[in-house]
Amino acid sequence: MARIWFSLGALSALLALVAASLSFHALQVEANVREQIVLDIANDIHLFNSLAFICIGLITRVYGPVLLVQVAGGVLVLGVLLFSGGIYISAMMKIEMLRPFIPVGGVAMFAGWALLAITPLMLGSPGSGRAG
């Protein structure tokens, strides 16, 4: 499971870099300043959460596939897809029907980070036998 999180984090970071490149080069003339700022914020959040996926891989490597950690990761993935993905698609492809899902993605990321924040309280020391 840890390898999946490492790969997902790296792939997500790659996609964030591709999205940043596309939004800068493809939309440089078309996008207004506000739209570019929104794309930049979505991209920063996407890249930051990609690092979280790698951290979840590290936690999983040390503690095993603890349910709380895996749920936190899944909710963060959903958040990135809906929030950053929704912004990318609506801004770059002009598909507006995904806009209502963008705030849902933001809330999912809040929830994922909250779950990740309580994880240390639920886990013992590595090797203590207490993992969730």
Image (tube, rainbow, N blue to C red):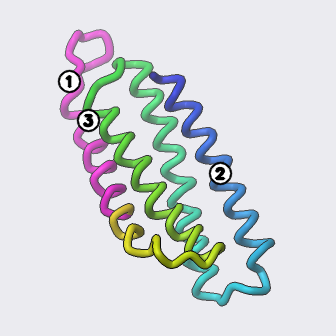
From the image, tell me which residue sits under label 1: 132
Q: Nearer the viewer, residue 106 or 128?
A: 106
Task: Please count the marks in the image.
Answer: 3
The x and y percentages for residue 86 are 50, 66
Q: Are marks 1 and 3 in contact (CB under 8 Å)?
A: no
Please tell me whether mark 3 sits on a helix, a strand or a loop. Answer: helix
Determine crowd level at label 3: few under 14, some 14-19, many 20+ residues with C-alpha closer than 10 A.
some
The x and y percentages for residue 78 are 40, 51
Question: Is 59 on the left-hand or right-hand side of 92?
Answer: left
Please tell me whether mark 2 sits on a helix, a strand or a loop. Answer: helix
From the image, tell me which residue sits under label 3: 119
Magenta segment, which residues?
A: 106-132
From the image, tell me which residue sits under label 2: 15
For discs 3 and 2, the disc positioned in front in the rendered view:
2
Tell me the distance, in whole angstroms, between the alpha carbons under discs 3 and 2.
Answer: 27 Å
Q: Which quarter of the rendered picture does the C terminus lie within?
A: top left
* Marks 1 and 3, the one that precedes in the sequence: 3
